[in-house]
Image: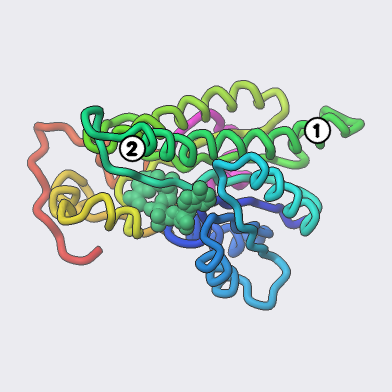
Amino acid sequence: MVERVFIVTGAAKGIGFACARRLLEDGNKVVLADINQADGKKALIELASGEERALFVECDVSNKLEVHNLVAETLSAFGRIDGLVNNAGIAVKGGSLDLSVTDFDRVLAVNLRGAFLVSQAVAKYMVDEIESREDRSRLTERPYSIINMSSINDTVALPDYLAYTVSKGGLLQMTRSMALELAPYGIRVNAVGPGSVKTDMLSGVAGDALEKIHSRTPLGRVALPDEIAGVVSFLAGEDSSYITGQCIYVDGGRLALNYTMPPRAPTEGI
Ligand code: NAI
């Protein structure tokens, strides 16, 4: 069987790194894209030292030229693109009264415009590829999949992370809009909505509020990056062939929590 090729953005660490590792374990080739060259190169060595199944490309997803370079380098190395995980993201603190316009723009530029730019470049490649086929009835031969790393904050708001919350709300609607647009080509577009995941971003955002997060999470703990990567693997593969336009929330029950349920006592561990 031909190996499928996936691009994962923000793959140098955290959730993106776990997704890249899982997609490689699943037998795919993976391009790790990240703005952080040092961490990206380290990640590549850790994941695929001496192998030719992975590649690191330095890329700021908010920069259109760098995104085009990412797609070009992927095609030059592996000759095809079958899937994309739009995972790169940043969170900057600030609400409507104190967030600077610069910070608002910066968060939206990475989390929303970045995901748009990479999706657009990859989707154009996929559509061109499909349209060049003689037999359009065999659409499912190359099952293309685009996956956006959203958040429970696409639905429930953080008052002190306004731009982040807005960006994830936008990403959810972009997922749905692109899913409808690309469905006629058999290209599936979905999102994953994590609750709280043990990464550097969570340490920065949650600070000492971890106990509060545990108490509002029915499973009583935060997730490990691999628990998000498993759902990405599912959405990337054939077992999810009839799922498009959806967001799968991986939140330990957080969105289902009703105020009639007593708060959960903090647990040791993760
Ligand atoms: P992280 O901060 O640990 O890793 C983010 C990666 O993205 C880093 O390697 C960073 O260099 C890269 N990156 C940042 N800006 C970039 C840019 N302009 N271009 C390319 N790469 C860039 O973050 P984490 O926690 O792994 O988050 C990954 C995604 O998951 C983000 O979209 C985040 O919003 C989302 N998420 C995370 C949650 C958590 O609790 N950690 C919860 C819900 C969603």
Badge 2 element: helix
Magenta stretch?
A: 234-247
Classify 10 Å Cα crowding around label 1: few (below 14), some (14-19), many (20 and above).
few
For disc 2, does the CB lie below 8 Å from ligand 1?
yes
In this view of the protein, can residue 227 be seen by the observer?
no
Which numbered disc, 1 or 2, marks the residue that appears first in the sequence?
1
Q: Quadrant of residue 266?
A: bottom left
- The residue wearing badge 2 is 152
Q: Magenta segment: does it hold 39?
A: no
Left or right: 180 as drawn, with respect to 159? right
Any part of residue 46 in sight:
yes
Residue at 76% of width from left, 49% of height from top?
Answer: 72
Q: Amino acid at mark 2?
A: Ile
Q: Please give the residue where the numbered disc 1 appears in the rendered image.
A: 128
Query: Which three-letter amino acid code belongs to the residue tagged 1?
Result: Asp
In the image, 69 versus 45, the foreground residue is: 69
How far from the left and from the top, in percent, is residue 142?
Answer: 75, 42
Task: Check the image and report above or below for 245 versus 161.
Answer: above
Image quarter in which the N terminus is found: bottom right
Is 137 placed above or below 3 here? above
Q: Position of residue 69 (x, y in %)?
A: 71, 49
Q: Secondary structure at mark 1?
A: helix
The verdict on label 1 being within 8 Å of ligand 1 is: no
Q: CA distance from mark 1 to mark 2?
A: 34 Å
What's the residue at 68%, 77% (across, down)?
Answer: 50
Q: Is residue 180 above or below residue 19?
A: above
Left or right of 45 on screen, residue 199: left
